[in-house]
Amino acid sequence: MTTANLRPLTACVPACILLAVLAPVLAGLIGAVLPATGWFPPLGGQRLSVVPLTAFLAEPGLARSVLLSIFTALTATALSYLLAMGLLAVLVGTGAAGRLVRLISPLLSVPHITIAVGFLFLLQPSGWLTRLISPWATGWDRPPLLNLVPDEAGWALIIGMVAKEVPFLLLMGLSAASQIDARRLLDEARLLGRGPLAAWALVVQPQLGRRLVLPVMIVLVFSVSVVDMALVLAPLTPAPLAVRILAWFRDPDLSFQFIAAVGALAQIGLAGLCCLVWAAAAHIWARAVRSVCARGWRLSVPYRMARAGHALLLAASVLPCLLAALGLASSLIWAFADIWRFPDALPTRWGLRGWALGGDGLVRAAVTSASLGLSAAAVSVLAALLWLETTTTARRTEGLMYLPLLIPQIAFLFGLQILLIWLGMDGRLVTLLWVHVVFVFPYVLLSLGPSWRRFDVRFADVAATLGAGPFARFWRVKLPILLIPLLTAFAVGFAVSQALYLPTIFASNGRVATLTTEAVTLAAGAGRQTLGAASALQMALPLMVFLGADFISRLRFRRFSWFRV
Amino acid sequence: MTCNRILAYRLAVLFSLAAVWLASFGLQPALADEFDTLADRARGQTVYFNAWGGSPTVNGYIAWAGDQVKARYGITLVHVKLTDTADAVARILAEKTAGKTAGGSVDLVWVNGENFASLKRQNLLRDDEWAFSLPSFSFTDPAVLPGLTSDFATPTDGLESPWGRAQLVFGYDTAYVPRPPRSATALVDWLKQDGNQGRFTFPLPPDFTGTSFLKQVLLEVSPDRSVFDAPAPSDKAETDAALAPLWAWLDDVLPYLWREGRHYPANYTDMVRMLGDGEVAIAMAFNPSKFSNDISAGVLPDTVRTYIHDGGTLANVHFVAIPFNANASEGARVVADFLLSPEAQLRKANPDIWGDPTVLSMARLSADAAAAFAALPRGIATLSDAELSASLAEPHPSWVAVIERGWAARYAAN
């Protein structure tokens, strides 16, 4: 086969992938815009009007909901970013970086709702923390009347998101740091007499920041429109905007559909606003850095203080992750507790009540989650390979692929639901798979892209001179070399699919229960034992996939061990 | 003349009684035949039952019902676990929006009150009075239990089939509350006492139980509760005036509520868990045997007991309905009939299984069946039927939205 024969393929494949990913988003957006402007025939909306808008604006507590969304999103993203950058500054090039990543990457693979449930189990007034210190240290024989989880300002939600996003940004940052050779830049800055943090902030961060724009925007948009985590950790009087939009969609008074549609558009505006604020802050920071460099200012910090600063930074970034880990631990205890009353530090009777009560439902949800996750990851990895092989360099269109992550989910999922019903495709497994892929594919591309694009073509050239055709070069040279990033991308894709909440309920008509939808239902009041069991399964599934990926790569590299010299 | 008229009247009564008597011979087999053909057509169907899925006991019962209809009628029952029944309402609407008049995704939905009123108003339900023609419906007696045909004052018109009964009961921990407050006013006094402050709350409206608690207080503190039997007036000044006593009551207790009324539990199971933790001292549920169930499950300490308010508490009936575009409407009707059968109702009423009171009339059951109901165990915290007899009728469903919106604007927006 010659290159000429491949050309139609290289033109067609990316276009098809682009269409498959973007069509649902755009169609869904139209499905939100029409009702928002008053056009929704089945409810008697036949002409354009501003009634939905005025009704939306008249909703009680709207301003507070909006402020809560903005505050939690910006704070969580800023904290996650600063902590991830701080960790990178301290760790890049040291062996500790790899160890830390291995330590916290399990957090990356656990769904958001599982982290949230863990926080609930840990930090509630009746949670594990107060149980551990009561009554012997506190005198509390009843849970104290404290405003913990959810708290007034949304800090529980913020810390929960930070625990989830620090590992994500750290991983993205490490990958970007290796691309710009951060170690060398750092060394050079250090040779010029800068301290490690200053060297990082003045030399490495400006370059790194540019490469992290996309991941940060993804985090920002996700945070401002998160629903599942907010349902558990955010104050609900009033709730953040995204939660209220879902409530409007679900209101038995169907005229709220119009308000919900306006809310969906407002959510996009909110996400845009947050991104603008972020960009402005980044711009100011960049100017500040430039002027500091230009004027040669330097701040001399005593060595001991710098050490203390490092330790503090490390503690600050590890604390949310540590809380998350303790929360997951308390979920596991609940999963195997029959009776565990306040203020006992541990269950008084262990057992499997949660599993018995959860019954078939949990098992079925786990099977659905696993098969959906595996298929979505497989399809996405395949699509990513096709995309990367048919587009030579990172094209501008690649940015479009991230659109599903950059538009708040709730803004287009309702419109999409109507479209799917109209096409007669609602509630089918294949539809659910497709919608999952829309969200999984961008993450897979994000994870796989950089290492794929950095593949040293000389390997392929050597193979070509040995007479290998394009497919042999791909199968026998490129794929084995890039096996580890490929498996990682697969595991990432699986984890993303696991965590999807809104896409699952909207695309499946609520008919298909995954562990995540089950956990959200259970978190609203079912027994803690069953909720704990659901959480345990949510931890186990991604872990198994990651272990499986690790096992395959080890197996592979044992065969090639002679190759490593 | 007068005599003739009386005679004519008596004859008319006699003839109609005779006609009913004769018809009952003809009707029963006809109904049964009709149901048999229905069951034949239902065989092999998959019924998607959209029902709130937040309670493991309820979920367990529905799973049992699924096994039963599978074995008897070859119907596969899939429980679509809802967080909120309004989800299903929205979905049926979305299908209507998309012009999907057949093959819909919801076959059967657990519903009552406001959600039913909404479905009915939008013509989203199967409307051939199917519920009245189910064989098991003959075991009920709407004359004794008017809620069977009038769902929160909205006529059911056979659009939904009764499934169970509910009454608001309060559970309290005798370890902390020696004498529970038996009225809305007494509750305020109790809540203001030292040691009780912060130890009471209710589920966040529009949660069903949370809104019900607001309605309960409203009915108790209103000088004239007959206003709420009629639809809520569209004039805002009138509704404001009607609801003023409720807001005054809430303003009074707000500082003494759990977390000063800044946060609320998500629903009643969440609140009952808080009772078990000792975080609150009083909780409420719409199922009289909920507290006994949870004592035997180890969620609650065995010091918990229940009570209702002296003036009575809200009581209502819950139903199952079939959407206009259900894909398996035959299967759905067969399932609805099974859910209403004495056997299924008996199991549901058993506090070890679920403890949801039956909608059947004991007088219309066989002696054996009635005896089986009488022999059901009663948990240690469950009130007797006599104690539960003081009940309040639900306000017209149109008040729900008014109350919920008023509540949200006052207490959930700052």
Image: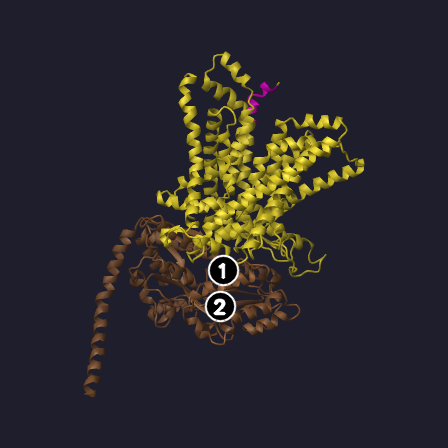
For disc 2, the marked residue is: B215
- Chain B drawn colour: brown
Q: Earlier in the sequence, mark 2 or mark 1?
A: 1
Residue A334 higher or lower than B174, as above or below: above
Chain of the residue displaying label 2:
B
Question: What is the x, y in percent for residue A267?
Answer: 51, 47
Give, as a three-letter code, the residue at label 1: Pro
Q: Is residue B231 left or right of residue B211?
A: left
Magenta residue check for A48? no
Foreground residue, A22 or A48?
A48
- Is the N terminus of chain B in the top left, top right, bottom left or bottom right quadrant? bottom left
**Type of secondary structure dominating the magenta stretch:** helix
Judging by the rendered image, the residue that carries numbered circle 1 is: B206
- Chain of the residue displaying label 1: B
Kind of element beneath mark 1: loop
Instruction: Identify whether A295 is placed above or below B216.
Output: above
In this rendered view, identify the residue nearer to me: A262 or B18: A262
In this rendering, would B29 be left or right of A253? left
Looking at the rendering, the stretch of residues picked out in magenta corresponds to A554-564
Q: Is residue A263 visible?
A: yes
> Looking at the image, do the residues carrying marks 2 and 1 touch, with CB atoms under 8 Å apart?
no
Residue A561 in the magenta stretch? The answer is yes
Give the CA separation, mark 2 to mark 1.
Answer: 12 Å
The location of residue A463, given as percent across then percent down, is 51, 15
* Three-letter amino acid code at the position of disc 2: Lys
**Which chain is painted in yellow?**
A
Residue B83 seen in the current view:
no
